[in-house]
Image (cartoon, rainbow, N blue to C red):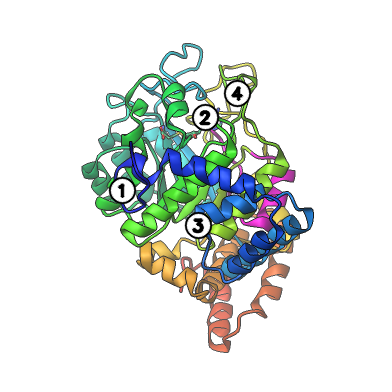
Amino acid sequence: MYKYNPASKIAEEFINHEEILETLQYAEDNKNNEQLIARLIEKAKLCKGLSHREASVLLACEIEEKNQEIYELAAKIKQDFYGNRIVMFAPLYLSNYCVNGCTYCPYHAKNKTIPRKKLSQEEVRKEVIALQDLGHKRLALEAGEDPKNNPIEYILECIDTIYSIKHRNGEIRRVNVNIAATTVENYRKLKDAGIGTYILFQETYHKESYLELHPTGPKHDYAYHTEAMDRAMEGGIDDVGLGVLFGLDKYRYEFAGLLMHAEHLETVWGVGPHTISVPRLRNADDIDINAFTNGISDDIFAKIIACIRIAVPYTGMIISTRESKECREKVLKLGVSQISGGSKTSVGGYAETESEGEMGSEQFEVSDTRTLDEVVKWLMEMGYVPSFCTACYREGRTGDRFMQLCKSGQIQNCCHPNALMTLKEYLTDYASKETKQVGEQLIEKELQTIPKEKVRKIVIENLRAIEEDNRRDFRF
Ligand code: SAM
């Protein structure tokens, strides 16, 4: 039998089933323990995070008043660490060829109805130009797992193509990659290609369910998948993104597993997850979510996000267009720091819109179908600063260097001015008239909140140079 050990590199030791069961029991036993919950909230206020056990108690907490305190604290921690900035990104689907048998994903190998597509380099170019014309600077690459159709060489070639395209004032400055678990050698190649974050969703931490949900293909190997982040770190990638696909197994189990994974990375590599994603299962080509019984309500979803924010204060949290405008609005307050906008989940979806009636290659149905311009305007009207910044990674502030910046609260000093300058680029190059108007007013207001006068002066000069001299890419 495996014994819980966060320092171990064996999947079933750092994500330990017995430890999770005991954690869930502890949380259940203490869900109305007012004294303990009050103590945990006090501890969380120190912004040093909570263990998976402690956070699981807060997730289970049934005391209404304490739950309110949890939400308020999550909102405060979000504000303290990330301010009012929201980082923008878009997914780019390269290929939906896949050899796996994931029962919840329409890319699964046995699906004969979904049209299979893989972008040629010329098509990647068209997609990137379309994405640049929307205003995007940061992408998350997505692909199925297929060693013949999408080998690592193909992914690397796409990354090269993407970084090489400079269309008008556009450029993609950070490429994050969400592809199947791979070898240390391949992670090293991705690192050398200049990727930002390597993202891999665990889908479920529950091994038995994992094996059932991934009945065939290389992804069936639970240990290989679960240990992928350690191989990525070994390959030199120090920004990794975790995630669970909520709806597959019981959310409390997943929550504990996710936090144990974060603790494991901190223990072994001294750096926790750069980001945590919280996707929820959606209907898709031949996937009906009614066949899955562990779906969660919007309220539980919000509670999970608040508890992750409290437990891992430094991590970026990502939400995609799987979620509706209303849901996104709620969770932005509680901890989410990155959102996608104007997303297409089909292969080739940005350059050409699939005509109605034509069978799509989408991975799942998008809930928030607004354009990027609409999302940007909506964020600004709520007082957020949409940020197209990619500076940290390009200035070498990755891994523990980024974490130190974030944990010390210093993230505010360079990130806020960078957000304003990249927003200005967006407003100047891509925004509609109304969005530009709202944005210019917001920038004016936000400039006053830059504490150092010297920095403020530089930012004001750079904003002028963006507008009048057509200069781009200023950053601290
Ligand atoms: N193929 C890669 C892998 O195996 O990790 C990752 C790329 S896949 C395009 C990205 C993610 O989409 C998956 O990790 C999964 O969590 C999510 N996904 C798959 N089917 C989904 C569905 N029906 N609804 C919502 N998300 C889904």
Assess whether mark 2 and mark 4 are in contact (beta carbons under 8 angstroms).
Answer: no
Q: CA distance from mark 1 to mark 2?
A: 30 Å
| Pointer 1 with pointer 3, Cβ within 8 A | no
Few, some or many residues within 10 Å of mark 1 (<14, 14–19, 20+) = many
Q: Report which residue position mark 1 lands on.
A: 230
The residue that mark 3 highlights is 51
In this rendering, position of residue 184 left or right of residue 101: left
Q: Residues within 10 Å of mark 2 (few under 14, many from 20)?
A: many
Give, as a three-letter code, the residue at label 4: Phe
Which tag is nearer the camera, tag 4 or tag 2? 4
The circle drawn on residue 196 is: none
- Whether residue 369 is situated above or below residue 263 in the rendered picture: above
Of 323 and 267, nearer the camera is 267
Q: Nearer the viewer, mark 1 or mark 3?
A: 3
Q: Is mark 3 within 8 Å of ligand 1?
A: no
For marks 4 and 2 on the same chain, the one whose residue lies earlier in the sequence: 4
Sequence-first tag of 1 and 2: 1
Q: Secondary structure at mark 2?
A: loop
Q: Which residue is mark 4?
A: 292
Q: Residues within 10 Å of mark 4 (few under 14, many from 20)?
A: few
In the rendered image, which residue does mark 2 sit on?
346
Q: Which of the two residues, 399 or 136, is positioned nearer the viewer here?
A: 399
> Residue at the location (57% across, 86% down)?
452
Q: Secondary structure at mark 4?
A: loop
Q: Nearer the viewer, residue 425 or 340?
A: 340
Q: Which residues are magenta?
A: 323-346
**Is residue 430 something that shows in the picture?**
no
Q: Are marks 4 and 3 in contact (CB under 8 Å)?
A: no
Q: Nearer the viewer, residue 176 or 224?
A: 224
Q: Position of residue 279 (x, y in %)?
A: 56, 39
Labels 4, 3: front one: 3
